Image (spheres, grey):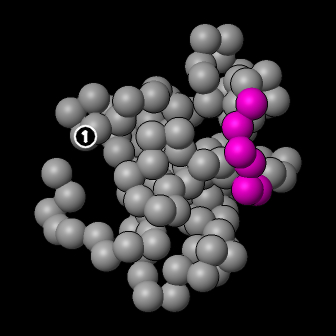
Amino acid sequence: MAEVPDCIFCKIAAGEIPAKIEHADEDIVAFHDINAAAPVHLLVIPRRHIASLAETTDAEAPLLGRIVSVARQLAAKFELDSGYRVVINCREDGGQSVPHIHLHLLGGRRLGWPPG
């Protein structure tokens, strides 16, 4: 699994930086966002470094599907039965602050629209 030495998410996935982990398998890690925007705010990331959604290819489709599946499983675990939001920000103008693809799972309160 290619790790980028200065990537904070690569370091979390490798266990070098502590995080409150909710899911970890061979390919994916999910953990609580330290700047939570909702009562439940988890980040779901691939262990392999991919800078953003714009850098993916069709070859990553199975991995991206698994990331979404893990988010669905976590929504069930946290009993977000009344609804939740999944967000993938892409690059700086899209609101991506860490250059490692990640999915936000937000829930636990009514979420407004538009988001920002």
User: What residue would you read off at disc 1?
Assistant: 94
Question: Is 20 covered by the magenta stretch?
Answer: yes
Range of magenta residues = 18-23
Depth order, front residue of 24/51: 24
x then y, percent, for residue 109: 38, 73
Question: Residue 20 lies in what quarter of the image?
Answer: top right
- Relative to 37, 9 lies left or right: right
The residue drawn where x is 53% and y is 44% is 33
- Relative to 44, 54 lies left or right: left
- Relative to 70, 113 lies left or right: left
For the N terminus, the image quarter is top right
The residue drawn where x is 79% and y is 22% is 16
- Given the current orientation, which residue lies at the most extreme right position? 26
Question: Residue 84 lies in what quarter of the image?
Answer: bottom left
Within-10-Å neighbours for mark 1: few <14, some 14–19, many 20+: few
Element class at badge 1: helix
The residue drawn where x is 17% and y is 68% is 113
